[in-house]
């Protein structure tokens, strides 16, 4: 990480690009299942966890299209309520899909989430 050393007496100005929040994006990505249609998200961080969330959506029947700073998720063709174990084990946060799947299908099949000893 870079650092900025500012010596007083001069005006500081400029622009900084801030990426989206992982902790905000993950539950929103999971909630797209409940929409049952197209959802457009902006400023989603391009990190392992969000990529795994997109992959889980694809595996259960959604389409995910990325264009510059936006992600278009279409969950209208989701036809499964089972999260593949190999994807579930990729990250702890994958468990947040369970609420959306139960909300839509009244059931969900999943394994223990990854990276967790509980």
Image: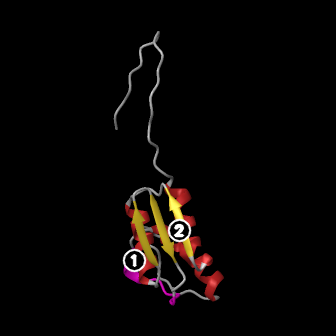
Mark nearest the camera among 2 and 1 is 2
Name the residue beneath numbered marker 2. Answer: 29
Q: CA distance from mark 2 to mark 1?
A: 15 Å
Indicate the position of residue 73 as horizontal and vertical percent values. Answer: 49, 72
In the image as oriented, which residue stretches furthest toward the top? 9
Q: Could you say which is closer to the camera, residue 77 or residue 34? A: 77
Indicate the position of residue 71 as horizontal and vertical percent values. Answer: 46, 64
Residue at figure coordinates x 43%, y 73% from the top left: 64
Q: Is residue 35 left or right of residue 69?
A: right
Name the residue beneath numbered marker 1. Answer: 87
Asked whether residue 30 appears in the rendered view, the answer is: yes
Where on the picture, by quarter, is residue 14? top left
- Seen in the picture, residue 102 relative to 69 is either above or below; the reply is below
Indicate the position of residue 68 as horizontal and vertical percent values. Answer: 39, 57
Q: Secondary structure at mark 1?
A: helix
Residue at figure coordinates x 59%, y 71% from the top left: 31
Residue at figure coordinates x 55%, y 69% from the top left: 39
Q: Could you say which is closer to the camera, residue 97 or residue 11? A: 11
- Seen in the picture, residue 34 relative to 12 is either above or below; the reply is below
Asked whether residue 88 appears in the rendered view, the answer is: no
Where on the picture, by quarter, is residue 76? bottom right
Indicate the position of residue 50 as horizontal and vertical percent values. Answer: 43, 64
Give the magenta part as a residue range. 79-89
**Mark 1 nearby-residue class (10 Å; few <14, some 14–19, many ≥20):** some
Residue 5 falls inside the magenta stretch: no
Q: Is residue 86 left or right of residue 97?
A: left
Residue at figure coordinates x 49%, y 52% from the top left: 20
In the image as oriented, which residue stretches furthest toward the left? 2
- Tell me the number on the disc at residue 52: none
- Seen in the picture, residue 70 relative to 17 is either above or below; the reply is below
């Amino acid at each position: 990480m870079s650092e900025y050393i500012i010596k007083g007496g001069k005006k500081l100005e400029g622009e900084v690009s801030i990426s989206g929040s992982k902790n905000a994006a993950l539950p929103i990505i999971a909630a797209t299942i409940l929409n049952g249609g197209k959802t457009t998200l902006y400023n989603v961080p391009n990190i392992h966890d969000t990529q795994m969330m997109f992959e889980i959506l694809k595996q259960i029947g959604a389409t995910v299209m990325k264009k510059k700073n936006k992600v278009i998720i279409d969950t209208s063709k989701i036809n499964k309520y089972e999260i593949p174990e190999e994807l579930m084990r990729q990250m702890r946060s994958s468990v947040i899909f369970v609420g959306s799947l139960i909300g839509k299908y009244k059931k969900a099949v999943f394994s223990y989430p990854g990276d967790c000893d509980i």
